[in-house]
Image (tube, rainbow, N blue to C red):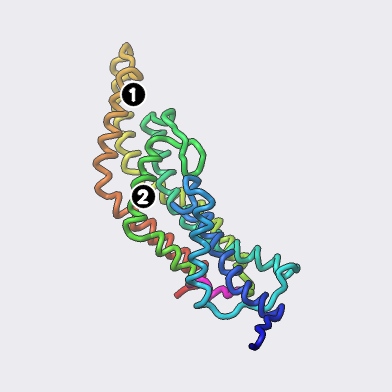
Amino acid sequence: MQELVVSEQQLMQFIGQYIWPMLRISGLFLAMPVIGAQTIPARTRVVLAFFTTLLVAPLLPPPPDVLLISVEAMSMIVRELLIGIAIGFIFQVVMHVFVLAGQFVAMKMGLGFAAMNDPATGVNVTILSQFYLLLATLLFLSVNGHLMVIDFLMQSFGTFPIGGPGLGFDSFVHIAHLGSWMFRAALAIALPIFTAVLVVNMAFGAMNRSAPQMNVFTVGFPLTLIFGIFVMWVSLSVFLSSFELVMQEGFTTAREILRLP
């Protein structure tokens, strides 16, 4: 009976065939919306990354022969993790557009004090931010956005192969510019409610000048709150179109950074 002999190089190549893709996939699952939330246990994300790697690794070309304990291996680990985290962070910014929009609306309506802990991020956000984020998350899952994000990751192995140079400085600058885009997009979503509540505040200002003895704060605060909630309810009819525009911008940015057609 012939004895099976496996060399050290073959063993390292076999391990690298799975370990390098798993690093990029783990980085994505660490930062992407829904799966990367703190409400998802770390053990669950590790299991998802493991089984995703089992499906993806056989479809990828053989990785370069690199010793797992070397400086080159450490640099590859950093590059693979950064690519996955960058893809997930792009769509995390997209989802936080709606959190920021809810923050703007709440501050204008006087609901800035009504805050609660967001279980997904562990920070305090307003009630309206939670409401908008919940709607955006449901729409994100209903259009299979999580599968589209994973598809972007799979395509990244073609433009950024394992062992390649990784993301460049211009890519990180582009990701940093998403911060200003997030504020613009959130303000565009909240602007109709801003305008409506501003008109109400101007009306109460005119009433205060004509009747100084009336306590405008006592009368105006509940009316402003009720009117703001009504306008927000009316504006939900265009929430889907706003979500589509924001998601389209996020997909476009991801394609540009990953150099996809």
Task: Tell which circle, 2 or 1, labels the residue nearer the N-terminal end.
Answer: 2
Contact between marks 2 and 1 (CB within 8 A): the answer is no
* Residue under the image location 36 percent in, 44 percent down: 132
Q: Residue furthest front?
A: 1
Q: Tell me the SS state at disc 1.
A: helix
Q: CA distance from mark 2 to mark 1?
A: 29 Å
* Residue under the image location 36 percent in, 40 percent down: 131
Q: Nearer the viewer, residue 233 or 161?
A: 161
Up-down relation of residue 32 to residue 152 (above or below): above
Residue corresponding to mark 2: 136
Q: Nearer the viewer, residue 77 or 2?
A: 2
Magenta-span inclusion, residue 109 = no
Residue 102 spot, x, y in % from top left: 39, 40
Q: Residue furthest top?
A: 213
Q: Main secondary structure of the magenta part?
A: helix
Residue corresponding to mark 1: 221
Q: Amino acid at mark 1?
A: Phe
* Residue under the image location 51 percent in, 61 percent down: 49
Quarter holding the N terminus is: bottom right
Q: Nearer the viewer, residue 89 or 245?
A: 89
Residue 112 spot, x, y in % from top left: 43, 31
Residue 171 spot, x, y in % from top left: 57, 65
